[in-house]
Amino acid sequence: MSSVAVLWVAASSPNPDPMNTCGLVRALESSRVLSRCQNQRVNNGRRNQTTQTTWSSSSSVMSFRRRRSSVVSSSLVAHPAGEIDLSSEEKVYNVVLRQAALVNKQLRSTSPVLDDVKKPQDIVRPGSLSLLAEAYDRCGEVCAEYAKTFYLGTLLMTPERRKAIWAIYVWCRRTDELVDGPNASHITPMALDRWEARLEDLFHGRAFDMLDAALADTVTRYPVDIQPFRDMIEGMRMDLRKSRYNNFDELYLYCYYVAGTVGLMSVPVMGINPKSKATTESVYNAALALGIANQLTNILRDVGEDARRGRVYLPQDELVQAGLSDEDIFAGKVTDKWRNFMRLQLKRARMFFDEAEKGVTELDAASRWPVWASLLLYRRILDEIEANDYNNFTKRAYVGKVKKIAALPLAYAKSVVKVSS
């Protein structure tokens, strides 16, 4: 977590003026001094890797085969208010519909000759644009430091989209670090409530610091819905109170919170190819599928690391069916039972990758290459787990530099495939 985030959760947040120029300038000017005095560096954690990779991979297509006859409010995802019996997939599907509707609304109201960027109506004061540019540059620096491969991919995007992706990446990283960073032991549910209140301010144009200002500007330019941001914070809450998952339905919801949300945040910025015949909903289902696939890959890669922290991110009922228990995981022995269990888990993760892969070509041409590169590289982690004879207790599966470089031409070739007819 960045020290800016630590500072905020440790004290009450100020309430700067709305960022209709005056508030923006004041927030940027004060935060520029603040950010120079604070160390933005944060440690890489398991879910940090999710943020980096889900980031670039947050655009592909998954088709939900089950269609619902009724849609409930997406607020049920992060804040259940009643005893409505919905599966996790149904809850998440409502958020997908909400984001897709927001994008479709903007597409209907935007001239086809314009880029998919909304133009803010605020009056610009002298100097405010240079301060905002500095805020975006700072986000780019953080992205370059902690997500090097993806950062290079973003340089292929248009300047506006590139900056917006940086801003979203930084917010996700700061949020993740609240419970996975060096100050995680001091984070309480109340601190997360305050972080969420700060998010609400941000979407209303009230920025607390320079990094907030960049995201506040981004959400005025693109049809980004606030719900996935809220849901990511809910994933942080879940990590504070939960270390076991009874079944895959529970685990699926967790994977959505901490990874699938990133796809829903970023696709509005990455853009859909104007020649694509795919539905907006299917593109967002793709982003969701890839986020789930990446998080499942993280979980399978980090079984031993999580076990040493007393956590088991595996479906308890499936462990029982395989003749295994938490004690077997803590013992860290690779047995035939464990190999059979892992084969099924890898198969499921690959199914999500396969569903996600179907829709990457529907993205805007400038966004496809980094997405394909990330998808192909992250999926190879599953191959490395197999190569390690399913020993994810003491061996960390990773894709070496040579294999990474070798994957880039294939990713580029896939990125130039024509969109659906």
Image (cartoon, helix red, strand yellow):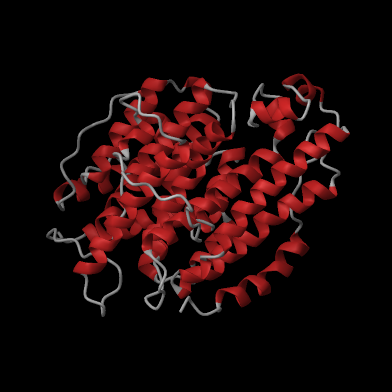
In the image, residue 93 sits, relative to residue 319, either above or below, namely below
Q: Position of residue 380 (x, y in %)?
A: 72, 56
Left or right of 77 on screen, residue 301: right
Q: Residue at x 45, y 55 (%)?
A: 285
Q: Is residue 192 visible?
A: yes
Left or right of 297 on screen, residue 165: left
Q: Position of residue 365 (x, y in %)?
A: 47, 75
Q: Residue at x 71, y 34 (%)?
A: 303
Which one is nearer the viewer's eye here, 285 or 287?
285
Q: Position of residue 399 (x, y in %)?
A: 74, 55
Q: Is residue 40 visible?
A: no
Left or right of 59 on screen, residue 384: right
Q: Quadrant of residue 189?
A: top left
Q: Residue at x 65, y 38 (%)?
A: 299
In the image, residue 382 sits, relative to residue 4, either above or below, namely below
Marks counted in the figure total 0
Which one is nearer the viewer's eye here, 400 or 136?
400
Q: Residue at x 45, y 40 (%)?
A: 174
Which one is nearer the viewer's eye here, 163 or 309?
309
Which residue extends farthest left? 123
Q: Position of residue 336 (x, y in %)?
A: 87, 35
